[in-house]
Image (cartoon, rainbow, N blue to C red):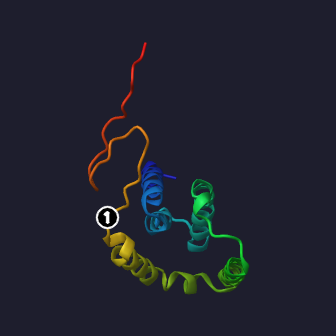
Amino acid sequence: MTPGIVLLLFVSGLAGGVINALAGGATLLTFPAMLAAGLPPVTANASNAVAIVPGHLLAVLADRGKLLPFDAKLWLSILVCLAGGAVGALLLLALPERLFVLPVPALIGIATLLFLFSPRGLSPPARAHVPGFAACPAGALPARPRISSSA
């Protein structure tokens, strides 16, 4: 592996981590970088999927207070997602690689447009109250934490 490829993968991985932390969608950057590095498409897809699992698990833990109750509707959604994932994985393994690569540019373009024009993407981010930080308008940097020195 050349130093240029190592740098490409390192920078795309770093940028992808930042993108996922802010909004999600790092695959739009990391998957093409893996393809450019010469990985076969199916291997790049699987590697990319495995690489983002820890971030998703941490996001669930961080937002566990916002999780929906485990009712019948949620269990049904989980089962549908698992079945869809299993069917997709079997298709990925059964179909020739050229059929997997064919729609990738269109899918990346569609995903980019969805991110760009989604209601969440068009509205300013919600301002969360962080203890010790002064409130700030959207887009502005928060003030430094106030530290009291009572000695």
Residue at image x 43%, y 41%? Answer: 131
> Residue 44 appears at what percent x and percent y?
57, 67
Say which of 69 and 36 sits in front.
69
Task: Identify which amino acid the numbered label 1 is placed on.
Answer: Pro
- Quarter of the C terminus within the rendering: top left
> Residue 48 appears at what percent x and percent y?
57, 64
Say which of 10 and 141 sits in front.
141
Q: Is residue 45 above or below residue 73?
A: above
SS type, badge 1: loop
Residue at image x 38%, y 71%? Answer: 120
> Residue 111 appears at what percent x and percent y?
43, 77
Residue at image x 38%, y 77%? Answer: 118
Q: Number of marks in the image?
A: 1
Q: Quadrant of residue 147?
A: top left
Q: Is residue 45 above or below residue 147?
A: below
Left or right, residue 61 beside residue 9: right
Left or right, residue 97 beside residue 19: right
Left or right, residue 109 beside residue 55: left
Q: Quadrant of residue 139?
A: bottom left
Say which of 2 and 19 sits in front.
19
| Residue found at the very far top of the displayed protein | 151
Residue at image x 46%, y 67%? Answer: 25
Mark 1 Cα-neighbour bin, 10 Å: few <14, some 14–19, many ≥20: few
> Residue 84 appears at what percent x and percent y?
67, 83
Left or right, residue 123 beside residue 77: left
For mark 1, what is the residue? 124
